[in-house]
Amino acid sequence: MGLAMLLMTVSAQVNTYIVKTRTAQQKAAAAQQAAVNEAASQTTDENAPTDFISQNFKFYSLCDWKEGMKFMVMPEKYDLIVRTFSDAATGKEVSSMSLRHKIMIYRGHTVSADGHSRLNFFCQDDNKMYYFEIPNGSFDDYCYGKLGVPTLAYLGDVDIAKEKLMGKKLYTKGTIYRIDTEYDGDGYREVKMPKDLSVTVTQVGVGSRSFPVKIIVEDENGNEFYQTFALSKTNSGMRDDEFIMDSLKHTFYASFELQDAIMAVNRDFSTYIGKTIHTMQPTKMITKGDGKDRTVNVPKMTTFRVDQAQRRPGTPYVTLQLTEMESRRPYYLDVLFTHPDDLAERNVKLEDYFGYIFAMGEGAERKTTQEARAAIRQGRVIIGMSEEEVTLAMGEEPNEKVMGSNGKHDWIYYRSKGKSLFIHFGRDGRVEAYETGTTKTTTTKKTSAKKSSAKTAKQNWKNGKGTPLEN
């Protein structure tokens, strides 16, 4: 058994199409060493598309398959019951599991002596010929359907993805990804990741028949995870309208955004895309809040990544899409890349000039706990946060600061529908409590209303009636 385990592990390593995240690799390394030790104790032997996907991944219907196209046998549970291939030499059906991970090369279609249409394949792993017999009708009748050939994952997409994506930087667009739990199996568990996380493609391999391309990425902390995709949908057995709900994440753009693709669209500003910048001045920007766009005051020394830069037609302005690096929250700002003194247009001002607002590189070094970072990315305030962490979580400076006694003080953020968020800081400058309360909008009573709300909120907190942040 030890030798068998070692042989299976070595076999998986030789096949470069089978890739695994490190979690499974580490388990496999331990298992391999155990197998070697056990074996040693017993024996001394040793068209004009514009986007990245449509431009590089062409769909081939079965009618358009060319001889030489490569596939890998990736059986699913159903394939253990219904066999797909027959041995061309004997005519006998072959177990799908015995062909698992073997590479099949398409050799065209023929008609047998008894009138059945067959799709022929050469297996490069055992140098034998196999065929898939079409259940009913002719090849022409069958090839226009979505069925294709069961168990086969198209390797052409894998090879192209490996060439185009290895080492590339991507940004996560979804939240649910996977890590492997088995080295010689298909086990996995799902993990939740933040959106707009910068990652690098470390491995590309085969996934499954439905989603043939497996892309493994690594974040800046060394964590690996993956997703599987139907890039061209060749032989995936799924139509475009079936990629909804849970299957939507298996389309590339629902899970990742390619930095190079963004740069191609915004080539005039390609030197800025993906770069880190920070504010040199307190700046008003637009972000999402309460289900709508809202303008917020961003403090200076806040660090962003530039994601997109689009010209505003008919104006000298460029709209920047930015990601704040601590909270991962998106922001939008119209800027000038040409100095106002060099523009003939009126109604432009120095405060809109990119070089006045931003400097390249990171802003202030931020020391935050793991719990605070998680809350910041969710836009929440938690007990123990510093003033800087609260500003990052809220995305702006407070609308009002109220000084108290003994070094304590409050911050007030105005919210929609007449409500406000009251954050109470202790003498150590960290959050002791936070409350929501109602703010009156009558101008003459505004100050007293705020104080009254703050007093009520503090009393509620003391009485154990604290409420979570309502953003």
Image (tube, rainbow, N blue to C red):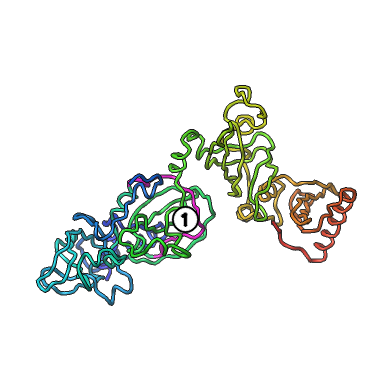
Residue 123 on image: x %, y %:
18, 61
Residue 243 on image: x %, y %:
43, 62
Residue at image x 33%, y 73%? 77
Which residue type does callout 1 highlight?
Ala
Residue 463 on image: x %, y %:
82, 66
Q: Is residue 284 magenta?
A: no
Q: Nearer the viewer, residue 7 or 251?
A: 251
Q: Quadrant of residue 251?
A: bottom left
Residue at image x 82%, y 63%? 460
Residue hosting label 1: 254
Q: Quadrant of residue 469?
A: bottom right
Quadrant where the C terminus is found in the figure: bottom right
Residue 165 drawn above or below residue 174: above
Residue 202 on image: x %, y %:
39, 49
Residue at image x 41%, y 45%? 168
Residue 40 appears anywhere in the view:
no
Magenta range is: 163-181
Q: Is residue 164 magenta?
A: yes
